[in-house]
Image (cartoon, rainbow, N blue to C red):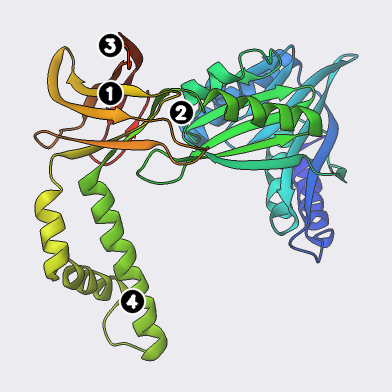
Amino acid sequence: MTPLQRGFALAVSLACCRAQQPADAARTVLVTTSFRASASYAQAIERLDRYYQDQTGRKGAEVLPEIGPRRHYEVWHDMWVFFDPAGDQTMVTLKRQSESATTRVVKGWMLEIAGRVDGDLPLTFREEPPLRLIERDVYASRKDIVAALAAQAALRPLASWRHAGLSVSAAPLTSVVLAPMGLHGVHHLTVSAEDAAVGNQTVARVVQATAGPRICAAFSEMAGLEAEIHKAAEDKRDEISLRAAGLATSAQLDLQVIEQKVRDTPEMQKRIAAAPGVYGILYRVDRAYRKIVVSLFQAERVLAQVSVPNVRQPAGPGAPLTVRVRTQPLAPGAYRVRLDGESLAGESSRIDERTYWFDGKIFEEP
């Protein structure tokens, strides 16, 4: 196919994408296409490597990691990419979950990949039943998810600049995505699975693994307060806009003025004065302790230590226990948190220890 013919075929395929756009924007489907590519498997990987380096500044091994023999996952667009031999050509199959409102965009991504590997155009798209979706809010890090799912050999943990945590499987199609929910260590877990039983089992393993005694998260009191002020100002601005449409000042200026007014209230000034250098540690226990000791380290230097007496296991599942430590305001860097316990019989034990990277606002496990 000549470049002119390829360009015409690409235009026809894009037009088909527009014509096939469903009217129901809420419907979710698994968009699938298969096509022959004149490029060999090695050539396709090489070409896509150049494409991803040009588009994202990252190597193909990071954007399109292998999750099985000739099976890959495209981290940039959350897409499965399969390569199978077809004589002297390569059969390429692309699969990606999509809501109908974004299906045309997804098909455009697939067309771009097809063009990079000399795929036969126009493409034929299928809208298959969607993957089962299960969502939970969890106190868990990427490391927690990887450890919890270690027994599921098909799931491959992947490094991702787009996700707080990512594990995927080629057969059955499964993805486990972890996304931060805010400043207090909560992450949103989304499991998409071709097999409903696999999806339910995956979520159950994560929930079970994160319910035991452990350090759940760390957070900055000051960062949380700043987020609270910003949210209160946004709510107030929206309220003002509804009552007085067409304000003369810009929305950004309005927000800054309102934020300052929120900060200037006596109650908020009192909280702001007390917040610097205060950091919260969330943790779980599975039995009663005479005392719990929480220590914050920078390298081997103890920055703060708090002893909490008479700690009891909560009556049921719910939010973790919280203890606050005070030290000098932390600069961005790596910090270690240790959780020790003394039983009712007087025996001391190490419950958990974790290292976090603090960027000035959020603590995340590296």
Q: Which mark is residue 346?
A: 3
Q: CA distance from mark 2 to mark 4?
A: 34 Å
- Is residue 268 left or right of 174 when viewed as pictured? left
Instruction: Judge whether 325 appears above or below 354 on screen.
Output: below
Separation of residues labelled 3 and 1 (CA atoms):
12 Å
Q: What crowding class fits label 4: few (fewer than 14 Cα within 10 Å), some (14-19), or many (20 or more)?
A: many
Residue at the image point whose x is 79% and y is 22% from the top: 171
Q: Quadrant of residue 260?
A: bottom left
**Residue 326: quarter of image:** top left
Type of residue at label 3? Gly
Mark nearer the N terminus (4 vs 3): 4
Q: Secondary structure at mark 2?
A: loop
Mark 1 — residue? 292
Q: Is residue 69 left or right of residue 181?
A: right
Q: Residues within 10 Å of mark 2 (few under 14, many from 20)?
A: many
Which numbered disc, 4 or 1, marks the residue closer to the eye? 1
The residue carrying mark 4 is 237
Mark 4 and mark 1 residues within 8 Å of each other at the beta carbon: no
Within 10 Å of disc 3 (Cα), the crowding (few <14, some 14-19, many 20+) is: few
**CA–CA distance in space, label 2 to label 1:** 22 Å
Q: Earlier in the sequence, mark 2 or mark 3?
A: 2
Res. 195 in view: no
Q: Amino acid at mark 1?
A: Ile
Q: Is residue 66 above or below residue 357?
A: above
Label 1 secondary element: strand
